Image (spheres, grey):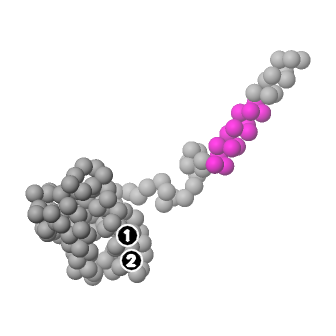
Amino acid sequence: MGKLNLFLVVVLVVVLGSGALLFFEKDAFGFGNEKEKGLTVEDIIELSIDTDVITTNLASNHFAVVQFNILLDSKEAKIELEKRKPEVRAAVISILAGFTKNQLTGREGIANLEEELFSKLDVILESGQLERVLVTEFKVQ
């Protein structure tokens, strides 16, 4: 009788554990929001914009050469941001003007630049939302 009780306890723990995992981590079993699973390469190409290469002065006596890839959540948002490219360029220049060469050094510097541009463009964009901003070219001299 003791082995049967032990077996039932083990089965109960496994069933409850699986149920808890399913409840809290839906993606662990392949369930959940499709958007959270990621976009295909084709979707990323269709919903992203590359900025021109932008060269501008920094707050120190240096300059930066940058380019960004901006991923949006819809075709409407992409069309709007393409029409607002001068505003995007101005946002990049104004953000970089506040950075020094030392502030842009390393992963943390690039991450801060991406975050600041994301925040600034998020305010500009009226239709749709930004998904991410990536630095695709980066030189500081």
Instruction: Tell me what residue is drawn at x 83 percent, y 17 percent.
Output: 3
Left or right of residue 73, residue 60 in this image: left
Whether residue 69 is visible to the viewer of this picture, yes or no, is yes
Q: Is residue 22 magenta?
A: yes
Q: Residue 129: which quarter of the image? A: bottom left
Q: Position of residue 51 (x, y in %)?
A: 22, 69
Q: Position of residue 74 (x, y in %)?
A: 40, 72
Proximity of marks 2 and 1: CB atoms separated by less than 8 Å:
yes
Q: How many neighbours does mark 1 have within 10 angstroms: few (below 14), some (14-19), or many (20 or more)? A: few
Task: Give SS at disc 2.
Answer: helix
* Three-letter residue code for mark 2: Val
Instruction: Tell me what residue is drawn at x 73 percent, y 39 percent.
Output: 16
Q: Which quadrant is home to the C terminus?
A: bottom left
Q: Which residues are magenta?
A: 11-24
Instruction: Tell me what residue is drawn at x 23 percent, y 56 percent.
Output: 104
Which residue lies most toward the top here? 2
Q: Residue 45: which quarter of the image? A: bottom left
The residue that label 2 is drawn on is: 123
Q: How many neighbours does mark 2 have within 10 angstroms: few (below 14), some (14-19), or many (20 or more)? A: few
Q: Which quadrant is home to the N terminus?
A: top right
Whether residue 72 is visible to the viewer of this picture, yes or no, is no
Q: Is residue 47 magenta?
A: no
* Three-letter residue code for mark 1: Ser
Which residue lies most toward the right here? 1
Q: Position of residue 48 (x, y in %)?
A: 31, 67
* Label ID, residue 119: 1
